[in-house]
Amino acid sequence: MISYEKIVSLDHLRPWSFSKVQKAKKCQYEFFFRYVEKIEPLTRADFLILGSGVHYVLENALNTVFKDGRPIRKELLSDFALQFKEMEPEADVSLISSFFPNIVKFVNGQLRRVEESSLVASEIELAVDDSFNPVSYSSDSVFMRGKLDFIFSKGNTLYIVDHKTSKSWEFNNKIKTQLRWYALLASVKYPQFERFALEVHNVRYGTVNRVIFNLRELSLFRRNLIPKIFSVEEELAGKSFGELQPNPSDYNCRWCEYRHVCPLAERENGE
Ligand code: SF4
């Protein structure tokens, strides 16, 4: 039973992540179902399960390589994929294993890259409050947060690697904005670095795209970003479902995980 009278509050909006802001801009109905009513999605898309499985295998492979200090064997990846299958029964292990050759190549390649690094870590959780002070990821005062897949340092540069499994080759502005979020959060947590090299590792194709930000660029980005987030908060806070602006379109609704509860989707389906 959906509480359409429920009022969107700041607690529903914060903490912000890059994808949460995207969702708020995409369709306010979908945002309400996901973050205010916290309704379970009807199904989890296959590509999301695949992406989580590949991330799980990669993270474990990286940790194993750095712990052992030697290249990983492909056979070990099957164990990680099966562990993931136990947690996520709908995972397709054979599909995940089609990524193994690129995972082995990437992971063993990182072993050489981090030889001189003073900082190496994977799955790092970063969060800041609304004054941009670092806070713990689950703290009540979190304003913005994000998770980094893998980082390592080289001199005054922090390398931040984001793994993707998408079919798209695109390295577009949306991806670059997401990378700026990560770099901004990392610059608060690791103020000792002057440059932040963001790498998108597409595990499907085994490619890497890189963009480098310096502190001046990140400071400018932060100055523009904060008012944008505040304006999203103004658009949503204090409103009930009936006051929100939906954004139905072929594309938005086809991939929406809340079609089963959205009144607009029902009308489109003629139900
Ligand atoms: S089905 Fe369409 S209108 Fe309804 S919540 Fe999803 S995206 Fe928005």
Image (spheres, grey):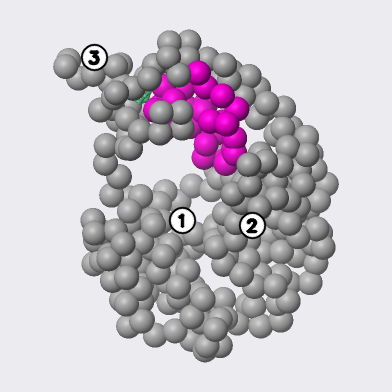
Measured Cα–Cα span from mark 3 to mark 1: 35 Å
Classify 10 Å Cα crowding around label 2: few (below 14), some (14-19), many (20 and above). many
Tell me if residue 8 can be seen: yes
Secondary structure beneath disc 2? Answer: strand
Is residue 221 at all visible to an observer of this figure?
no
**Residue under the point 48% across and 86% down:** 71
Query: Looking at the picture, how far across and down is residue 107, in whole percent?
Result: 49, 75
| Quarter of the view holding residue 232 | top right
Q: Is residue 120 above or below residue 68?
A: above
Percent x, y of residue 94:
23, 67
Q: Amino acid at mark 2?
A: Leu
Q: Tell me, yes or no, whether the two marked residues, 2 and 3, touch with CB atoms within 8 Å.
A: no
Can you say which quadrant of the picture contains the C terminus? top left
Q: Mark 1 highlights which residue? A: 164
User: Quick check: is 8 in the magenta stretch?
Assistant: yes
> Residue 267, which numbered label?
3
Query: In which quadrant of the rendered view does residue 231 lie?
Result: top right
Magenta span main SS: helix
Residue where numbered disc 2 is placed: 198
Does mark 1's beta carbon lie closer than 8 Å to ligand 1? no
What is the x, y in percent for residue 64? Answer: 48, 80
Q: Which residues are magenta?
A: 7-34
Q: Earlier in the sequence, mark 1 or mark 2?
A: 1
Q: CA distance from mark 2 to mark 3?
A: 43 Å
Amino acid of disc 1: Lys
Instruction: Label 3: state its secondary structure.
Output: helix
**Relative to residue 256, is residue 121 drawn left or right?**
right
Depth check, mark 3 against mark 1: the one in front is 3
